[in-house]
Structures are given as structure tokens and as C-alpha cells.
């Protein structure tokens, strides 16, 4: 996730640092390596009260003062020692912190002080993890080789692929609500109603993204997904697709509706609107 919102505080992950607004997005202050981040290229952000996690090209930055200062976590703390400690995404809940990295899924049970990295040896489809979501004992890792699902807090994973209904084995993002799991893949949006055991994939035929023929073989590419109740938001290469019937059908918003570009990399929604 490259954006997060908490109350009137908005966090924007950018290529030049983590921008933070305390007035609902009217103005921003940007935090960089000068404030403790491992790199100014921030891929994702997650916030819980005054604790802010920033997934960067140089590690996982953790702040306990609302983003004023950060402490950076790298291989010295158990994260994968690959690609300059590249961290794609982060999710947290309680003392558990999950970091999607280029070399596996980093899992911390002490608030991010130390990490244990899960890889293909633990059931991941690929060591490149693009996104992560967790709830209770369930942990979902979006990888280059499928959607890995754990029911034991991340100790072990079962991997889902096209054989289980996904549109493609490259999964960029994942979101889950109870037994409903959404997987944003290179081949469309996978939706499961049985906890991820099997998936039905939505593509352009379901009005997801651009009309057929407007793009080449990547036309079904879905880069991120978020859901709230029966409303599902899918970020695609052809706009922001919105469903109000649990993902059965979609209506796509494009530059014609005010988007800055039809290439949408992600989405997050609140009761006040959509932010990213």
C-alpha cells in the first residue's frame, strides 16, 4: 500500500520521501533520510495510532512519534539481505509487523524490533513479495509466483496459483475480509469466498479496467485492491474500477472522470472518500 489515512492525518508514499499531512491532505511535510528513513523512495506506508511504518528502497522505517523521526530496519534486524533491503509493502496489527520484501516475507512479533523472513522454503510461491495483508492467524503474501496463504500466523504457507483460479501467478496486492479474499494479479482480479481455497477471476469482460482490445496482453493487469463492505476498488492499467456488488460487476473511472492518469497503482478508501 502506498498511502494511508488515520483521522485527519494522511500519509503519502512518494519517490522523494514520506509526505505527512495533519490537516486532511491540505498541506504536507515530507520526511526523508534526514529523519531516519533508509531511502527516500517509499513504496508503502501503514499507520496505527502514533506508530508509522514506511516501506522503502533501503529498509523498513518505523516511527513511534507520528512520523517525526524513524528508525530503519534492515538485514541486521532479520529482513532479507537483498536489493538494498528493498521493502515493497507493510502491514501491522498489535505487536505483529509484516514486511513484503524482494527476498521474502519478514515477520516480526515484537513490534518491528526483529524479523524472521519466510521464503519459498516455508511455502511462498516466490521470494519476491509485492504485498501483504493479515488478520488474526491468517497472513496473505502477494508474490511473483502466486498468492501464499498462512493460517498459522505465518509459520507456513500454502500457495495459490492459476490452477486455483487466479488470472496470473504474478500477484501484486491482496486484501481480505473474513473468508472473502481479493487478489490483484497481472491477469485480473481474483475473488475467493472460501478463504482463498479457490478463486474466480474478473477481467475486462466484467468491465474491469479498459475495454477489450484497448491494451495488449497486460490489459487485465490489476495492481492493487481494497474492499469495504460490498464495495470493491481495483487499481488497473485502464483506470479505477469500482464494484458495489462484491466484485460481480465493475464500473471503471478514468481521466474522463477526473483521474490524473488511467494507470492506477493503488487505492485506499475511507468513509470520507478515497485516498491513496
Image (spheres, grey):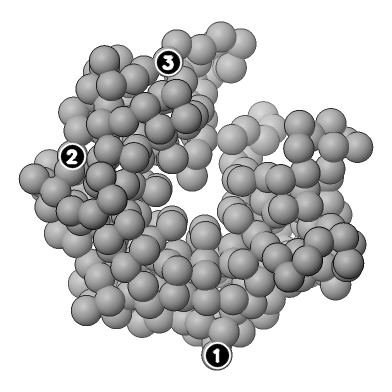
Foreground residue, 101 or 95?
A: 101
> Along the horizontal axis of the image, is 221 left or right of 104?
right
Check residue 171 in the rendering and tell me which mark sits there, or answer none.
none
Question: What is the spatial separation of the Cα atoms under label 2 and label 1, in whole angstroms?
Answer: 36 Å
Percent x, y for residue 250?
82, 60
In depth, the one of 255 and 177 nearer the eye is 255
User: Quick check: marks 2 and 1 in contact, CB under 8 Å?
Assistant: no
The image quadrant of residue 141 is bottom left
Label 1 CA crowd tier, 10 Å (few <14, some 14–19, many 20+) = few
> In the displayed structure, does residue 181 sit left or right of residue 272?
left
- Disc 2 on helix, strand or loop? strand
Instruction: Give left or right: position of 52 versus 7.
Output: left
Question: Relative to 220, is 41 on the left or the right?
Answer: left
Which quarter of the figure has residue 260? top right
Q: CA distance from mark 1 to mark 3?
A: 44 Å
Residue bearing the label numbered 2: 73
**Mark 3 or mark 2: which comes first in sequence?**
3
Question: Element at badge 1?
Answer: helix
Q: Which residue is mark 1?
A: 163
Q: Which residue is mark 3?
A: 30
Residue found 31% across the figure and 31% down from its top:
39
In this view, which residue lies farthest toward the bottom? 163
Residue 137 screen position, x and y as percent: 30, 66
Badge 1 or badge 3: first in the primary sequence: 3
Q: Residue at x 10, y 46 (%)?
A: 77
Amino acid at each position: 500500500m502506498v498511502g494511508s489515512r488515520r483521522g485527519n492525518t494522511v500519509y503519502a508514499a512518494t519517490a522523494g520521501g514520506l509526505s505527512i499531512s495533519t490537516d486532511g491532505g491540505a498541506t504536507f511535510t515530507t520526511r526523508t533520510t534526514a529523519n531516519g528513513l533508509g531511502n527516500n523512495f517509499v513504496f508503502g506506508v501503514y499507520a496505527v495510532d502514533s506508530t508509522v511504518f514506511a516501506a522503502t528502497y533501503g529498509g523498513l522505517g518505523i516511527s513511534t512519534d507520528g512520523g517525526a523521526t524513524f528508525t530503519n530496519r534492515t538485514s541486521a534486524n532479520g529482513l532479507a539481505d537483498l536489493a538494498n533491503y528493498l521493502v515493497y509493502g507493510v502491514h501491522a496489527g498489535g505487536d505483529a509487523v509484516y514486511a513484503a520484501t524482494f527476498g521474502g516475507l519478514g515477520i516480526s512479533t515484537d513490534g518491528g524490533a526483529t524479523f524472521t523472513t519466510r521464503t519459498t522454503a516455508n511455502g511462498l510461491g516466490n521470494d519476491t513479495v509485492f504485498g501483504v495483508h493479515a488478520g488474526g492467524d491468517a497472513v496473505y503474501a502477494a508474490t511473483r509466483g502466486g498468492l501464499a496463504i498462512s493460517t498459522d500466523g505465518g509459520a507456513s504457507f500454502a500457495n495459490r496459483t492459476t490452477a486455483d483460479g487466479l488470472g496470473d501467478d504474478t500477484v501484486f496486492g491482496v486484501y481480505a475480509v473474513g473468508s472473502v479474499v481479493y487478489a490483484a494479479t497481472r491477469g485480473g482480479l481474483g475473488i475467493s469466498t472460501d478463504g482463498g481455497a479457490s478463486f474466480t477471476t474478473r477481467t475486462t469482460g466484467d468491465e474491469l479496467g479498459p475495454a477489450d482490445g484497448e491494451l495488449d496482453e497486460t490489459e487485465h493487469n490489476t495492481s492493487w485492491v481494497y474492499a469495504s463492505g460490498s464495495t470493491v476498488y481495483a487499481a488497473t492499467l485502464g483506470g479505477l474500477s469500482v464494484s458495489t456488488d462484491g466484485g460481480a460487476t465493475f464500473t471503471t473511472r478514468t481521466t474522463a472522470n477526473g483521474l490524473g492518469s488511467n494507470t492506477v497503482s493503488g487505492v485506499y478508501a475511507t468513509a470520507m472518500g478515497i485516498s491513496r
